[in-house]
Amino acid sequence: MRYLELPGAGRMPALGLGTWKMGESAGHRVAEVAAVRAAIEMGYRLIDTAEMYGEGGAEEVVGQAVAEALRAGDVRREELFIVSKVYPHNASRSGTPAACARSLARLGLDHVDLYLLHWRGEHPLAETCEALRALVARGRIHRWGVSNFDTDDLEELAALGSDCAANQVYYSAAERGPEFSLLPWQRERGMPLMAYSPIDQGALAADAGLQKIARRLGVGAAQLALAWVLAQPGVAAIPKAVREAHLRDNLAAAALALDPDVLAEIDRLHPAPRRKKPLAMI
Ligand code: NAP
């Protein structure tokens, strides 16, 4: 597994497992726990979740899978990098620690490795930062970061301090908006960009242009899309998958090195933006 350096100290796996849409129905729970468990067995070390996903249901799925994996000796806690997120409406001075405590209870953990503000909301950033820093001081979270922040939001945040560890945004071979100013801004400061929906919620598996190149390389189009995201310096990706074949394909994609001519072909297919666009959100 490749790792990205985090600002200050520490590191984060470049590939993780997303969990949005998990924990929404009791009928899917067994399969979802098995998927997260299988991912850990295969070598995934970063798991991305949020209090929003299944209104806590996804955190419960992750908690059960992690507990089983730890009990079975598949992994040690310190090898895992668990990411969760606070709802903007909870991100007040008192609401943030309360939300974090609920997340930790559902996850069955004493800390998360990275805790993100899911998107900007009504609470002043300074208040949320203060609450997140207090959680770091108490050891309930090891680092904090943000999600769906564009360059101007990060500028505003930087004025409050430089300890934001990461920004998670929508970024894929077909959604390249962050490349215009956000990704360069983050690279300059050594702050990893976590790409969410890196295969456009599965849609890039059916992208005709990517399929053509992928066939030639003997891989799947989703794998090619994922390898493209992971080839961008300073970028981590968190594809979600429940199907075991998808989990395996995505892990294998992280080991794919794309030649410059393949990268150029993808660039022609889905060009980089020429001007600033509002940050896309899913
Ligand atoms: P995604 O990872 O781009 O795509 C997930 C979909 O693609 C699932 O339907 C999955 O199917 C399918 N898939 C996975 N691997 C595949 C492969 N190799 N070939 C073909 N299909 C494949 O979309 P996402 O779930 O929206 O984004 C990933 C994660 O980012 C989320 O789960 C969540 O953790 C995070 N996220 C964060 C935000 C935010 O605001 N911070 C927003 C969106 C997402 P199966 O599940 O059936 O295997």
Image (tube, helix red, strand yellow):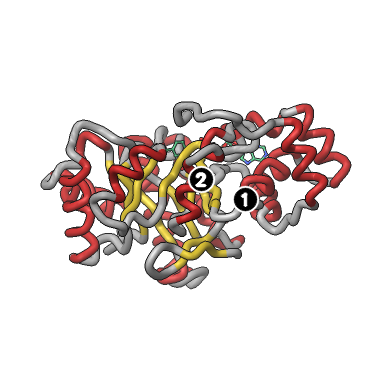
Relative to 253, is 87 above or below? above
Q: In this rendered view, identify the residue nearer to me: 190 or 142.
A: 190
Residue 240: x %, y % from top left: 54, 42
Mark 2 surroundings within 10 Å by alpha-carbon count, few (fewer than 14), some (14 through 19), many (20 or more): many
Can residue 36 be seen at all in this image of the molecule? yes
Which residue has dot 1 on it?
232
Q: Secondary structure at mark 2?
A: helix
Q: Amino acid at mark 2?
A: Leu
Q: Residue at x 66, y 52 (%)?
A: 231
Relative to 6, is 236 above or below? above
Q: Quadrant of ligand 1?
A: top right
Q: Using residue 78 as the reference point, say whether residue 170 is left or right of it.
A: right
Q: Amino acid at mark 1?
A: Gln
Q: Residue at x 36, y 38 (%)?
A: 152
Q: Secondary structure at mark 1?
A: loop
Which residue has dot 2 on it?
183
**Quadrant in the picture for residue 262:** top right
